[in-house]
Image: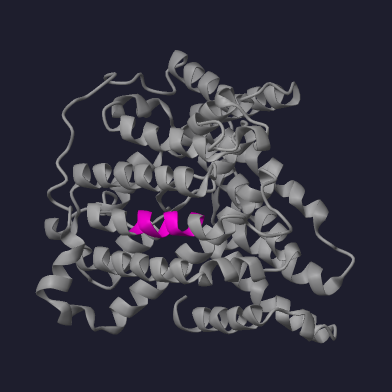
Amino acid sequence: MKKYFLFEELGTNYRREIIGGLTTFLAMAYILVVNPLTLTLDSVPDLDASLRMDYGAVFMATALAAAIGCLIMGILAKYPIALAPGMGLNAFFAYTVILTYGIPWQTALTGVLFSGLIFIVLSLSGIRETIINAIPTDLKLAVGAGIGLYITFIGFQNAGIIVADPATMVGLGNLSNGSTLLAIFGLIVTVILMVRRIKGGIFFGMILAAVAGMIFGIVNLPSAIIDFNVPSMAPTFGVALDPILHDPGSLITIEFLVIVLTFLFVDFFDTAGTLVAVANQARLMKDDKLPRAGKALMADAVATVSGAIFGTSTTTSYIESTAGVAAGARSGFAAVVTGILFLVSILFYPLLEVITSAVTAPALIIVGVLMVSAIGRIDWTKFEIAVPAFLTMIAMPLGYSIATGIAIGFIFYPITMIAAGKGKQVHPIMYGLFLIFVLYFIFLV
């Protein structure tokens, strides 16, 4: 086992990998609650029942899609990267596709399935891997740093430290709020543990925050430890295949094409950004290239197809994996641990009630600190590099999207390089991405 997962080469051990995998799981366990609430349009009152997906079925689909994605990523690609139905993509699925376009959720699942199948073809052909390796080093570093800023912003938001403000768009939240105070406590504890170089400091910080939350009544005690009444998957399982088998004509629409292309675009570059960011943080990049990138991308594609068949929106690589890396994870064994925990969570779901956003927020903030260190390796002395790198970084938190940051930065890169008389140094693929991103902003945004 140690030899297969390259423990000696990576300087890791079972303890580090298990803590890392558990930390990643705790950092992203919220998706087991948030994804079903989002896809069932729980926040929309007086909605026709036919437009709502079944909560229990979506919960099962979320857990199983995440488990399959993590296990394939860990065993095949050997990376400490976890997967689950993606935030943002699930909101697009529910609020844009179903509510705005009026497309049934059954057809939306078919769109996810199509995008996943296209990804498998692109991964087998090596196109996805070639694109990732064609991205210049400085932009890869900018993507990692930008994601660090992005998840730090999410952490502050989840903690209630930063909130929406009608006058300034964002502002300081109510620091006397119980959940916010709990997050601040967790942040201080985690910082102290990290400064003291306690291994697994992020993980132990979350545990201490959860315990403190229960003691002071901020976090509810779990209603039960285990529940064997597993929800049925019948309402959603295999539904994505129905339009293909029974009404293929319903798929020949501009709206359906937009759905597939949007799922395809966002998943592609969210995954690419996450892979590069996590690999950089874990020091797994070799000669500025990502080893086994094709296998990692294939894991993402297969997980998306599986998730669509089970009954959930696009499954993608999670940036919360960086929390596990910060806790010591370096190999695919950590992803296997996370995958197993997603399976176990089906029975131990009541315990997840204590892992609130206030508990996980400090982990996201600390991981952001660790990831932003990539800024120091960017060549800021060259303005033609500095501009696209900076725009890539800043657009992620401000645009609230990894893909948006990548798109803006990659549009400016060829422009600044040509202006500097270095157009020939730009890889042809980067020119192709320039055109794709311009079209993306014109037609899909």
Total numbered labels placed on residues in the image: 0
List x then y, in percent, for residue 336.
44, 37
* Residue 42: in magenta span: no
Name which residue lies at 72% across and 48% down. 372
* Identity of the residue furthest to the left in this view: 246
Q: Is residue 430 above or below residue 284?
A: below
Q: Main secondary structure of the magenta part?
A: helix
Q: Position of residue 375 (x, y in %)?
A: 77, 54
Q: Identify the residue at the far front of this view.
A: 3
Residue 136 % position (x, y): 72, 68
Q: Quick check: 108 left or right of 31? A: left
Where is 44 relative to 152, above or below? below
Compared with 140, 254 (above or below) is below
Mark yes or no: residue 390 visible: no
Could you tell whether 409 is left or right of 299 in the image? Answer: right
Q: Which residues are magenta?
A: 296-304
Tell me if residue 298 can be seen: yes
Q: Residue at x 67, y 60 (%)?
A: 289
